[in-house]
Every structure is written in structure tokens, then in C-alpha cells.
Image: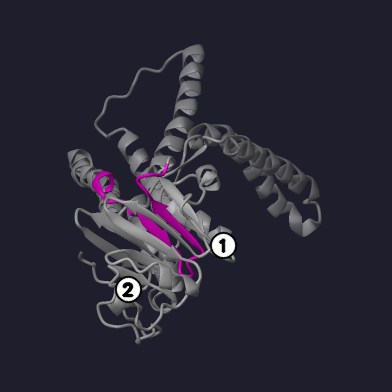
Amino acid sequence: TAMRLGALAICLIVLALLPEAVVEPGFQMSFAATMALVALFEMMKRGPHEPALPTPGPFIGALQASVRGIGGVILISLVAGLATDPFAIYHFQRFSVYALPANLIAAPIMSFLVAPAAGAAAVLGPFGLADPALDVMASALDLVAAIGATFGGRPEAVRALPAPPVAAFLLCVFAMLWACLWRGALRWAALAPFAAAVALYAGAPRPVVAFDAEARAIFAYGDALGEGWALIAGRGRSTYARDRIGAMLGLAPARVARLTEPESCSPGACALEHAGVRLIVVREADAFSSVCAPGAVIISRAQAPPNFSAACKPRILIDAANLARLGGGFIYVEGDAVRVTRAYPAQALRPWTRRDAPEGEDAPAQP
């Protein structure tokens, strides 16, 4: 019944009043955790025909109650964390290593200090007597914040993971829905789509170049680089673009901060190679005359000369006009082919989308 009421709340209340909330990560993670916990309690509930356990003595009963309480908190934290992890990885490319121990310490503070103090403040507020309860709640919340800072401040606390493909994420969500909505042995059928989601995620191709809509932060993977990745920054370097793209590639902030430009970089251009594909980043418009390389992938914030493509025959040319129309993107090298995905693909037209992009501009580029 609780699961059905939860579904009814989503459909009739949230969707009716705030339909845009469905795409928000907070909404998705909250309902995923709630649904998983309701399913957990349904699984643990004793059936009507199961024999009652014998009543233990006071000492054994107290021990059992303590173990059940501690075990329940651990299990609730574990299940809620596992239910929200796919959404955290998909939206934020983050996995929290210490989520379980942090929740175990913070949960009693929330249950025994914050919640009762908040209730008392709500009752005493109309009489002007809520200050002591609010002080207790504030001190308890300071403790929760300190716990979060202690665990979150560890360098290994948060692991960066690459963004999963949409298909893998949808399969994982379907597996969670199946496991929570069905009962009995049918729940275990969710293992099949979940395994497929993991396989898709593990086998998904990884980009070798990533750039933002203004080419202020360009990540490139080169064969001759010791760190594997290089960060080629343009003028007006955007820290937000750098950190966001690095997260989508599965690079931790500490590693992104260590990335440097290749030694081959000059004030006008940078060049590196991966799997036989040459990447050239042109920083100044005047440098186009010196980077005429047939078959290369060329990215620049500047506008390429009108006859550059015809004269130099690059495999892919992404210049200022192209960035303005199609935004940032990723470049994949798959065998002998080079594939480009963009933030605003030409075929995905919306009423607010500019329609001056040439048709099929961001189609996969072949050698």
C-alpha cells in the first residue's frame, strides 16, 4: 500500500504542480531512496502465516533490540546509498566512499536531536518560546556539518567516475523500479537489466578530446603524455568549465589541477597525437596559416579563414562559428573512424534552437 501511495503522490501531486521537478537530481534521488526503503521494509515484514518467535527474557530482549536498532540503521543507510548512487554518478560523476559511516554517525543526531528540537520549535514558536529549541537544533546541525566536513575533507572521500551512457542509466533505473515494485521471486529478475547496465557502462567508449562551448578548457588524451590527459586552456580560462568537463571524464579535481599543457604547445597552437589521429588546438587566428595538416582534428576559439577547409582538408574543423552553433562536445576515436558528439546537435531542433547550422554538421566524421 505504501508503494502505491508513493506512486500516486508522484503522479497526482508532483507531476501536476511541479512537472519540471522530475528532471531534477534531488527529486530523483529522494524518491529513489524512499522507494528502496519501502521495498526493504516490505521484504523484512513477517508474513501473516509465519509462526511467532518465542518471547526472550529482559536481558536477551534488550540485546536483540539493540542489535536490531544498530543493524536497521546500517541497513537503511546502505540501501538508501545504493539507491541514490546511480543518480549521483549520472548527474554528478561522483561516488562517495564514506557515505555509509557518515550517515551512521549523523542519523542518530538527526533523529534524536534535530527532529525533536524542530518539532518543539514549531509548537513553541507561536508563544515566543522557540529559542531554546532552535539553539539545540542549530548545535545539532553544526555537528552534522562537522561530520560531513571531516569525512568529505579526506582526499579519497569522493571518487570521480566517467558519466555513464544514457542507455546504461535507464537500464539501471528500470532494474531498480522492477526490484521495488514486484514482490517475491520476481524481484530477482531485476538482476538481468542491472547486469546489462553495468556491462554497457564498463564497455562504453571513452572520449579522447573534450571541450566546452567557448574552447576555454580542452582536455585531450595523448599517447606521449605521462599523465595520459593534457589540459589545453585558452585565454579567459574557465575554472567551472575545466572542473565540469573533468568530472564528466572521470577525473578527480586533484588530478585536474595537476594537468599541464603538452611541451609541444606554443603561444599560437598546440598539437598532440592519439591512435594515429592528430589534434591541433589553434589559439590565435594568425596561427591557422602554420597548422595546415590534412586529416587532422582542429579546434579553435578563433574563426578559420574562409578557404582553410578546402586548402588544408582537415578531418574535423571546429572553429568559432561551429562552437556558437553546436556548443561543446566530445571526440571519440573508434578504430579508423573519428566520431563527434555535440551539446547542441544539428538534428535536435527545438523552438528556441538556431536553425542556421548546416544539416548533418555533427555527423560522425570518417577518415
Judged from this view, the residue extending furthest toward the front is 290
User: What's the amino acid at mark 2?
Assistant: Pro
Q: In this rendering, would 49 be left or right of 85? A: left
Residue shown at the point (26%, 82%) measured from the top left: 359
Disc 2 packing (10 Å; few <14; some 14–19; many ≥20):
many
Would you place residue 153 above or below residue 335 in this image? Answer: above
Mark 1 or mark 2, which is nearer the start of the sequence?
1
What residue is drawn where x is 38% and y is 74%?
A: 326
Q: Which mark is residue 207?
A: none
How far is mark 2 from mark 1, CA to CA?
23 Å
The residue tagged 2 is 345
173 magenta-colored = no
Q: Residue at x 48, y 23 (%)?
A: 65
Would residue 30 be visible to someone looking at this image? no
Reply above or below: 338 against 129. Answer: below
Q: Quadrant of the C terminus?
A: bottom left
Q: Magenta span covers which residues?
A: 201-225
User: What amino acid is labelled 1 in the image?
Assistant: Ser
Against 40, residue 175 (above or below) is below
Q: Where is residue 27 in the image (x, y as percent from the top left)?
A: 45, 58
Residue 217 magenta-drawn? yes
Q: Say which residue appears at 40% left-offset and 59% top-offset.
A: 210
Q: Name the residue under label 1.
A: 238
Crowding around mark 1 (Cα neighbors within 10 Å: few <14, some 14 to 19, many 20+) is some
Give the x, y percent position of residue 240.
55, 59
